[in-house]
Image: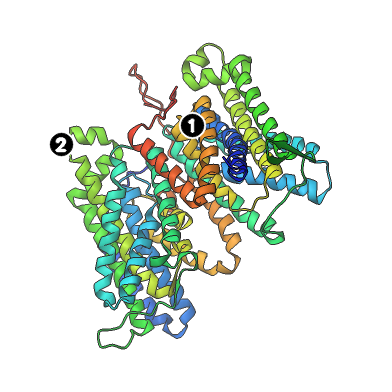
């Protein structure tokens, strides 16, 4: 994790951003004739948003939060329950996203003590608990059956939004997500986060507030998860605990790792490639599982830096002869 | 105490013993691999189910005698482990922080195996039942218990004892433990570190396979057992102390009894919540576990 994730240019330029924005807004309009493809495009855009949030935590923060989908689920269930209770969707959305953020910040607290595998395992446990809780508190979530026929939000006047205008909302969310990520990465916050990823003890000694930075990262990353989850529920029209289980977290992680963690556009490309794939293969969901598993292994073994980082493991330089072991904690 | 309550008590104890010994087997398998090559094997549950399904195919599909099938299944784990080790595992032996890579790798293996199971075995049946190893029923006090389950219990305990003896007294076991403790020092003392790595990977998987096939003889199972088993084995490993065989044994037994008792009075979901809660607390406050080496 130390040598191979320092991109030459730390942030996306204005031109790719403009291209992405134009494409994201044009796509729903172009595809509006064919609902099926437009739908896939919409789901992909939600995954772009999720991948950006995961990228902030995993790519820039070096933390692998496998409870990401669970946070999206918390927001989705909150929004669905609030709208069912008569709230406007546009009011419920920020509330649900904020719920997810607060939950994510609290559940991110173990990252202050645990590093590497231990935090990942901890987040896996948290994800499992969240999934179990979705099943267990059936009064709020309707248990394993899930909640179906979630209506699209209304436009304020009372009649529901047209599918096209909701697609454009999703485009706006995805573009906004990328823009926010670019802004964060360019800011001092982003640089502090990268410093912590590289070596948090050193970062602390340099005067960086490690605790605060990690918690802010979790707050923002979970906000991405929450907004995505809130937008996902009415778009698909159906949510169940399976919509937000550990496999979904792994899939979002895979988009980031496959695309190239710690780069702006890598995870976006990863989401653009993998999200439609999982949708097109929905009929053959078992094939999808095998394919995703193979991809996970391929990413780990062959291309740890992802598409954006190029193939091949960065050659490890021979350890400098300092009389101390450079692989701290690796051999036991 | 009335007879009914006595039966409930005795059956809880017997279930706890059987489940506990199987949990201990799987957790020991996971902890040996983690202790030596730093691989947190999240695929343990899928391997567990793989062994059970192989056993099902051999006994129900091909009509092989259960005892022979059990030996075949455990034997099969050896070439499988070495193939896996050769293809994937050995690439990371020298990578720093390899446990995260290994963890994700094993999650990938989990996903592949889960996909394969659901389009092969998942299509044929959703509940699998193996023929018993031995027939007949023994009465312990008022409680009737199938000889088959007693046999499973005896075998599981025997395997655990053999494993313990192997790790403690045999030179291979001593080599594995030496590499557990200090890889560089062990290498300097003439231990073949890589051979000991692949050996402990194979040994760990063989123990997981043994747990799977024994579980399949004792209980009918479905494919969802895999995920529950993965989480449980991890919880046992973390609470017992990663790399500690004794910890895995003791905590595995404790978990077996907890599962049996909680399932009697409440629901399995509550049992799962309690494991996960215990694991979280240990992770946060004593990440080295209760029986750290």
Circle 2 residues within 10 Å: few <14, some 14–19, many ≥20: few
The x, y position of residue B86, in whole percent, is 62, 35
**Camera-nearest label, 2 or 1:** 1
Q: How is the image coloured?
A: rainbow
Secondary structure beneath dot 2 equals: loop
Q: Residue at x 40, y 30 (%)?
A: A317
Residue A15 placement: quadrant: bottom left
Could you confirm whether marks 2 and 1 are on the same chain?
no
The x, y position of residue B16, in whole percent, is 58, 38
Task: Decide: is B43 above or below A35.
Answer: above
Chain that bears disc 2: A
Task: Decide: is A60 above or below A284.
Answer: above
Q: Residue at x 31, y 76 (%)?
A: A85
Chain that bears disc 1: B
Q: Nearer the viewer, residue A115 or A178?
A: A115
Q: Residue at x 30, y 53 (%)?
A: A104
Q: Nearer the viewer, residue A291 or B160?
A: B160
The x, y position of residue A192, in whole percent, is 21, 44
Residue under numbered circle 1: B38
Q: Would residue B69 appear left or right of A98 to someone viewing this image?
A: right
Circle 1 residues within 10 Å: few <14, some 14–19, many ≥20: many
Residue A207 is labelled as: 2
Residue A121 placement: quadrant: top left
């Amino acid at each position: 994790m130390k040598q191979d994730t320092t991109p030459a240019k730390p942030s996306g330029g204005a031109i790719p951003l403009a291209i992405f924005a134009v494409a994201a807004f044009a796509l729903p309009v172009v595809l509006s004739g064919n609902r099926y493809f437009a739908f896939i495009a919409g789901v992909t855009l939600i995954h772009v948003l999720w991948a950006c949030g995961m990228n902030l935590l995993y790519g820039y923060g070096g933390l692998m939060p496998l409870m990401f989908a669970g946070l999206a689920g918390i927001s989705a269930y909150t929004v669905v329950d609030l709208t069912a209770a008569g709230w406007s969707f546009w009011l419920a959305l920020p509330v649900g996203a904020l719920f997810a953020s607060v939950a994510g910040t609290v559940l991110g607290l173990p990252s202050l003590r645990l590093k590497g595998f231990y935090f990942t395992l901890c987040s896996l446990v948290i994800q499992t608990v969240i999934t179990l809780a979705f099943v267990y508190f059936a009064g709020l979530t309707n248990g394993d059956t899930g909640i179906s026929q979630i209506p699209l939000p209304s436009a304020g006047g009372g009649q529901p939004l047209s599918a096209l205008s909701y697609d454009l909302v999703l485009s706006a969310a995805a573009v906004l997500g990328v823009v926010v990520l670019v802004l964060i990465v360019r800011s001092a916050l982003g640089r502090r986060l990268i410093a912590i990823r590289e070596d948090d003890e050193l970062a602390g000694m340099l005067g960086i507030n490690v605790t605060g930075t990690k918690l802010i990262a979790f707050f923002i990353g979970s906000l991405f998860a929450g907004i995505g989850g809130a937008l996902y529920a009415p778009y698909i029209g159906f949510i169940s605990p399976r919509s937000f289980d550990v496999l979904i977290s792994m899939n979002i992680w895979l988009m980031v790792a496959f695309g190239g963690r710690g780069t702006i556009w890598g995870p976006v490309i990863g989401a653009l490639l993998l999200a439609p794939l999982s949708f097109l293969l929905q009929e053959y969901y078992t094939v999808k599982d095998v394919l995703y598993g193979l991809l996970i292994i391929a990413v780990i073994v062959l291309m740890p830096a992802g598409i954006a980082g190029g193939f091949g493991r960065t050659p490890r330089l021979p350890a400098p002869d300092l009389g101390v072991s450079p692989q701290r904690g690796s051999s036991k | 105490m009335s007879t009914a309550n006595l039966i409930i008590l005795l059956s809880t104890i017997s279930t706890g013993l059987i489940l506990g010994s199987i949990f201990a087997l799987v957790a020991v398998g996971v902890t040996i691999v983690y202790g030596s090559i730093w691989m947190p094997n999240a695929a343990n549950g899928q391997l567990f189910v793989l062994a059970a399904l192989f056993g099902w195919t051999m006994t129900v599909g091909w009509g092989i005698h259960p005892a022979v099938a059990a030996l075949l299944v455990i034997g099969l784990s050896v070439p499988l482990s070495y193939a896996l080790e050769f293809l994937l595992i050995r690439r990371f032996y020298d990578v720093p922080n390899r446990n995260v890579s290994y963890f994700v790798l094993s999650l990938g293996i989990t996903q592949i195996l889960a996909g394969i199971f659901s389009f092969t075995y998942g299509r044929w049946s959703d509940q699998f039942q193996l023929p018993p190893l031995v027939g007949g029923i023994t009465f312990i006090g008022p409680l009737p218990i199938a000889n088959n389950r007693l046999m499973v219990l005896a075998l599981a305990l025997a395997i655990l004892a053999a494993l313990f003896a192997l790790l403690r007294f045999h030179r291979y076991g001593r080599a594995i433990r030496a590499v557990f403790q200090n890889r560089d020092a062990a290498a300097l003392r003439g231990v073949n570190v890589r051979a000991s790595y692949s050996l402990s990977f194979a040994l760990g998987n063989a123990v997981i396979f043994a747990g799977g096939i024994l579980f399949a003889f004792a209980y009918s199972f479905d494919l969802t057992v895999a995920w529950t088993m993965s989480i449980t084995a991890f919880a046992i490993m973390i609470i017992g102390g990663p790399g500690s065989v004794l910890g895995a044994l003791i905590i595995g037994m404790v978990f077996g009894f907890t599962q049996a008792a909680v399932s009697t009075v409440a629901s399995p979901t509550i049992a799962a919540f309690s494991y996960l809660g215990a694991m979280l607390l240990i992770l946060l406050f004593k990440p080295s576990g209760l029986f750290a080496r």
